[in-house]
Amino acid sequence: MALRNIIGQERALRILLGTLKRNRVPSSILLSGDSGIGKRLAAINYAKAVNCLEPVDFDCCDKCMSCKKIDSEMHPDVSMIVPENDVITIETIRNTQEVISLRPYEGRKKVLIVDDADAMNIYAANAFLKTLEEPPEDSLIILISSNPERLPDTIRSRCVNVRFYPLPVDGCREVASKNIDPKSIDFVLNLSMGRPGLAVSRDFIKENEWFMKLLNNMIYEKSKDVWSDKGEIRAWLDMAFILLRDMAVYKITGSEKDLMLKCQGSKVKGQEIQSILNSYQDMQQVRGLLDFNLNKSITWNYVASIMRTLMANSS
Ligand SMILES: [Zn+2]
């Protein structure tokens, strides 16, 4: 694949290709936007275009030895770091700083891709800032982030920021349809909300079942099954927001046609718009507080009380 083959990110790709055409590749660049919409793919293909031996209209050829080596993660001048246990540590940053400070071995530029760059802890970010302030010659640093607001301003302001956006449904279908069961494609595309990477990598049918099961436990106290960690709380709340959205849609249209979740039965019907909005605000607050080590069982009980009040208000 080359940059030109990435679907639905015309603006971002125009900026990236523009830097190549003008021979103005910046020393550091931040690709930001939701997960699953092509940032990592663009980062890798930008690294390929920068180092390609036979560029096609300034984009990568996808065929030369350099392109092939980068695709198979064998290129000595291109490396990627990802968080381990959700964190990028100062040790990882120091190791990569050494690597990137060397001259390119066979390519035009040394490229360092930092995926989920916002996972750098404060020490890692401070150490990394030094590299951004004094970038080694012939180096290119590509940061990728779905939560750029979590990166320190000092880091963001040193990068050329290229924003990626969720795809329209047709674009998402074009990217993801080959890998999804046609029977569930509309359901999956709706829930992935323009993020084809998620449509392919996540099992939304299972997630829907899991969400409903925990919701029933929560409302009727059927079992002691709760979320296992903060990641599950986040994922469950994301689904809960879609449920609230479905309730509002049903209240307004009176039809099940445009609902996104499956098997909600009576849960979606009858709630008043004001109660839905109140619950939405309360849940937003819970989600915001998750970053501050919110206790799991207190969160469970609080969310349960929001959901029970909402369901009790249904007429
Ligand atoms: Zn090439």
Image: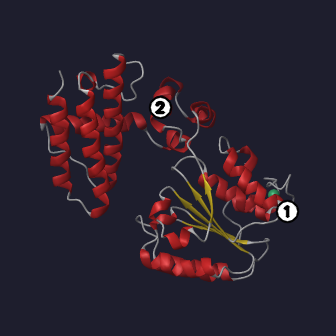
Left or right, residue 246 beside residue 221 = right
Display colour scheme: secondary structure
Image position, residue 271 (x, y; %): 23, 26
Q: What is the three-letter code of the residue carrying label 2?
A: Asn
Q: Label for residue 190?
A: 2
Q: Ligand 1 near label 2 (Cβ, under 8 Å)?
A: no
Q: Quadrant of ligand 1?
A: bottom right
Q: Does the residue labelled 1 lie within 8 Å of ligand 1?
A: yes
Which residue is more in the foreground, 176 or 4?
4
Q: Mark 2 or mark 1, which is nearer the start of the sequence? A: 1
- Horizontal side, residue 104 vs residue 173: left or right: right
208 or 247, which lies in front?
247
Per the image, label 1 sits on a secondary structure element best described as: loop
- Work out whether 142 lies above or below 275: below
Identify which residue, 213 or 19, lies in the foreground.
19
Seen as rendered, the residue at the extreme left is: 221
Rendered location of residue 127, percent (x, y): 51, 81
The residue under label 1 is 53
The residue at the point 54 percent across, 82 percent down is 94
Q: Which residue is drawn at 67% across and 58% down?
A: 44
Q: Position of residue 311 (x, y in %)?
A: 18, 30
Q: In which quarter of the image is the C terminus?
A: top left
